[in-house]
Structure formats: structure tokens, C-alpha cells
Image (cartoon, grey):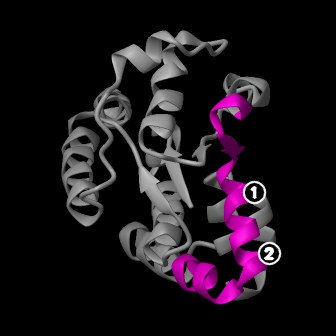
Amino acid sequence: MILCVDACVLYPTVLRELVLGAAGEGLFTPIWSDRILEEWRRTAIRRGPGDAAVAEGEIALLNARWPGALVPADAALEQCLWLPDPDDIHVLATAIAGGGEGIVTLNLRDFPAGELRPHGQHLHHPDALLYQFWLDGPDRIEAVAKRVHATAEALSGESLPLRGLLKRARLPRLGKALSSLG
């Protein structure tokens, strides 16, 4: 399954690491565009120069890890699409042009099913998507969560309850499902 990953999922870090960790486990193939990556950069820049530098490095790593993920812009396709927020049309265009089957985003209201369905696209909230992956086969998602959790604790220098970490990352269902892990 090929899914376009929206900028709001790529930043913040814990959410990105869990979603792309699932991709790394072969549960889906991610795609994005330069514009989606640029939105991530702009958000990081607003948070400060340190976040901006980290974002640049992370973007380079993502493009190296998934060299086929970057979908070129298709202005002609974008002209034929409509969404309630015109600034989101490029995300739908990326999903279509990249041969995707859906979009992973936190902004569910910005992508009405009636506008996605004619283009063969489905909408996925990251919590629902990861929870479904966990239901289908818990081992891979649990392994990803353990890695992300260990990294978050190492970076913070303190013990972080996994359920709270996932809740802050807007993944409450997954956090509840994985609460026995730590």
C-alpha cells in the first residue's frame, strides 16, 4: 500500500518515527513531495534554528532511505482538484501522481471522503492506521514503538511512560494498546 504522508505527520518527531517506522517494517510505502517537505522545514524554522537544522538533516535521511518516495509536483493535476483548503490540494495531487492509495494526516476535515473517493484515495489518521497495523500483527508495531520509546528516553534523559508519550504524539488508541510494553 502506497500512502502520502502529510507534513503534520512528519513533524513532530515521535509521530514521524512511529509512522515511518511502520513503513520501514514494510507495512506501507511512503510518498511525499518537495512542498510537503518544505512545510515541515517551515514549521521547524518557526520553532528555532536548532529545529530547522535537525529538520534539514532528517529530510535528507528520509530521501536517502526512501529514494522513490519523492513525487514531482504536477501543477496540471492540482488545477483539476478541489479541497476545502486550497493549500492542501498539493497533498492530494501527490497521492494521486505517486500512485498512492491514501493520505496519512491529522487534518481529517481538510480531506472530505467525497473528494478523495473519485481518485481512489482513502484517508488515514496515524493513530487509526498504526492501531490497525498492530491489530493485523502486533510484533512489528511493538518493535517500532520500543525503538522510538528508547530513543525518546535517551534523548530526554528521563523515564517516559510509553502511553503518555504516544498520547502526546496524538496516538491515544495505539498508546492504550501498547500500555503493557512500558
Mark 2: secondary structure? helix
Quarter where residue 161 is shown:
bottom right
What residue is pinned by disc 1?
128
Q: Is residue 175 visible?
A: yes
State whether residue 53 is above or below residue 156. Answer: above
The region drawn magenta spans 117-145
Instruction: Give the residue type at disc 2.
Output: Ala
- Write down the residue under mark 2: 177
Residue 83 painted magenta: no
Viewer-nearest residue: 102 or 135: 102
**Residue 75: x, y in percent?**
35, 16
Which image quadrant: the N terminus?
Answer: bottom right
Q: Residues within 10 Å of mark 2 (few under 14, many from 20)?
A: some
Q: CA distance from mark 1 to mark 2?
A: 12 Å
Residue at position x 64%, y 89% in the image:
139
Name which quarter of the figure residue 49 lies in. Answer: top left
The answer to whether 76 appears left or right of 67 in the picture is right
> Which image quadrant: the C terminus?
bottom right
Amino acid type, label 1: Ala
Q: Nearer the viewer, residue 179 or 125?
A: 125
Q: Secondary structure at mark 1?
A: helix
Residue in the foreground of this view, choosing between 158 and 170? 170
Residue 137 in magenta stretch: yes
Q: Position of residue 113 (x, y in %)?
A: 77, 31
